[in-house]
Amino acid sequence: MRVIVAKNAAEVGKRAAGIIAATVNREPSCVLGLATGGTPLDAYRELIRRHKEEGLDFSRVTTFNLDEYVGLPPTHPQSYRYFMQTNLFDHLNIVPANTHVPDGRSLNFETHCRQYEHRIADAGGIDLQLLGVGSDGHIAFNEPGSSLGSRTRLKTLTRETVEANARFFGSIDKVPRLAITMGVGTILETKRCLLLAVGEHKAAAVQATVEGPVSAQVTASALQLHQEVIVILDEAAARRLERRAYYDDVEQAQTLLEEGRFQELGIGNQS
């Protein structure tokens, strides 16, 4: 994993948006995996700014979202389709038919989930998957104990997740108990992953994800098995990392490489 520690949440968003924008510029017909929640909002705002002010073009981009609540129509203010429309899609020149979010209204769960997997495969796979991490270390709605080889499927939400999301619904009784989510195995098949975390309440999950053992109890830890993962954190979320100094050294070396400052890395200094 490449671990980048930014000053604050806004900087996390800008760094993440820069990586996403570079992917779009390099491959205009790329496939992006997207996430919902408060963490990626700064990145989405920066992408919108780059589109409007710098001409970042999403006209050939395809997207797949990680998950959706079961039982919510796309017009429900707490549905993830509604979130994506209001916070990103409606502000870009992306083709609506190229944006995919699991359908929370589907009751034929097995067929719908299988079709979602087929759509990802037909699109050529996901080039860059954006991820957040839950305070218990879960990614997407792959709650603790989920199979690390799991595919897109129906998932029962934990009591902790339901309680955490109650503030968005006004009452815990209104929070859906089921969701459709990409599986851990689906996420591990993406070409690159970009994991974001902000706030001290995510620090323990970040430490377990990056430095702990790979475990189904912390499904984000499975990212240690992925060939290319970039983790961007603010100072608070990075607080518990035991190898923080090394991550900073790696990032400094990466910067010097990208800038061609080879002598500062000891390259070419040998007689």
Image (spheres, rainbow, N blue to C red):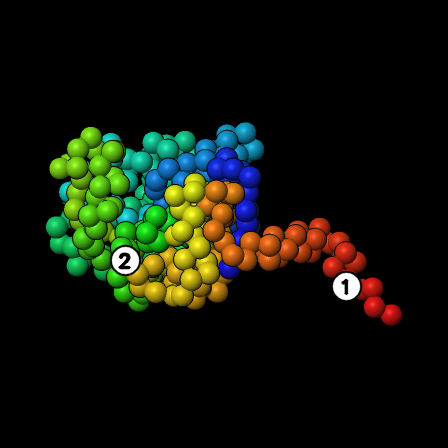
Label pair 2/1, CB-CB below 8 angstroms: no
Tell me which residue sits at (56%, 33%) in the image.
54
Quadrant location of the C terminus? bottom right
SS under mark 1? loop
User: In this view, which residue lies farthest toward the bottom?
Assistant: 271
Q: Position of residue 146 (x, y in %)?
A: 26, 61
Q: Residue at x 22, y 57 (%)?
A: 153
Left or right of 133 in this view: 173: left
**Is residue 51 or residue 148 the one in the foreground?**
148
User: Residue at the spot x=38%, y=63% of the render?
Assistant: 222
Q: Residue at x 41, y 57 (%)?
A: 208
- Left or right, 241 with reference to 268: left
Q: Position of residue 103 (x, y in %)?
A: 22, 46
- Total label count? 2
Q: Which residue is mark 2?
A: 144
Where is residue 122 drawn, in percent x and y? Answer: 34, 59
**In the shown orientation, is residue 104 left or right of residue 187?**
left
Q: Is residue 167 left or right of residue 204?
A: left
